[in-house]
Every structure is written in C-alpha cells, then in structure tokens.
Amino acid sequence: MSNEKNMVNTYKQQLMFVSQQKQQLQFQINILDSSIKELEKTSEKRVFKGVGNIFIMTDKTDVLKQTKDSKETVELKLKNLEKQESEIIKKLNEFSKENSSKKQEGNKENVEGVA
C-alpha cells in the first residue's frame, strides 16, 4: 500500500513539474507571437536583434524567420509535454480506480463477515 502511495506521489510531482514547464512554454509562445506581430507590422528593412547582452542590426526577414522557427520549436516541445501530462493523468486515474475498487471489495468483505 505504501508503495502505491509513493508511486501516486511521484506521479503527482511529475504532473506539477510538467504543468510548470507547460506554463513557461506557453509564456514563451506568447512573447514570440508578440514579436512576430511587431516584426510583420514594421516597414523597416533592418531591425535590431538581441544577442546576449547586445543588439545587432539584422535583416528583418531573417529575424522574422528565426522567430517563427523558434515558435515552432517551442510549440513542438509544448505538444510533447501535453502528451506526457496526459500519460501521467492516465496513470493517476488508473491508481484511483484501483484504490476505489479495493475499497469496495474491502467493504463487501466487512458486510459479509457481519452477516
């Protein structure tokens, strides 16, 4: 029984960790979306791109392409995390079903023992 509790706690911790990662990736996607919109709005041919602690002048189309590629990569990571999250939830639900059926069997044995 304590082994099952350990497994459930482990899955819950994994679920929390995956949820936090998902939240961070969603935040990154929002920032990248905003950057893409601003790049598409501007009529400038060259824009500043942040590289580490400095900004360099770069062709707008290159920055736009790199930003879209970054967004695509982050979205793929997000999809993978969503798959992991659904697997963890599935496992937690299985443990929950097992526990409820064990409790029902225990209750039946108690009732039969009284009769």
Image: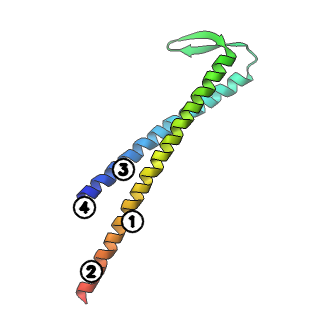
Q: Residue at x 41, y 45 (%)?
A: 16
Judging by the rendered image, the residue that carries numbered circle 4 is: 1
Residue 113 against residue 14 in the figure, above or below: below
Measure the C-alpha gap from mark 2 to mark 4.
18 Å
Measure the C-alpha gap from mark 3 to mark 1.
15 Å
Chain-order first, disc 3 or disc 4: 4
Measure the C-alpha gap from mark 3 to mark 4.
15 Å
Amino acid at the residue labelled 4 = Met
Chain-order first, disc 1 or disc 4: 4
Amino acid at the residue labelled 2 = Glu
Chain-order first, disc 3 or disc 2: 3
Residue 81's label in the rendered image is none
Cβ atoms at labels 3 and 1 below 8 Å apart: no
Classify mark 4: residues with Cα within 10 Å, few (<14), some (14-19) or many (20+): few
Judging by the rendered image, the residue that carries numbered circle 2 is: 109
Residue 97's label in the rendered image is 1
Chain-order first, disc 3 or disc 1: 3
Q: Residue 6: x, y in percent?
A: 28, 53
Amino acid at the residue labelled 3 = Tyr
Q: Residue 7: x, y in percent?
A: 31, 53
Where does the C terminus fall, quadrant-wise?
Answer: bottom left
Q: Residue at x 31, y 75 (%)?
A: 105
Q: Residue 99: x, y in percent?
A: 34, 66
Judging by the rendered image, the residue that carries numbered circle 3 is: 11
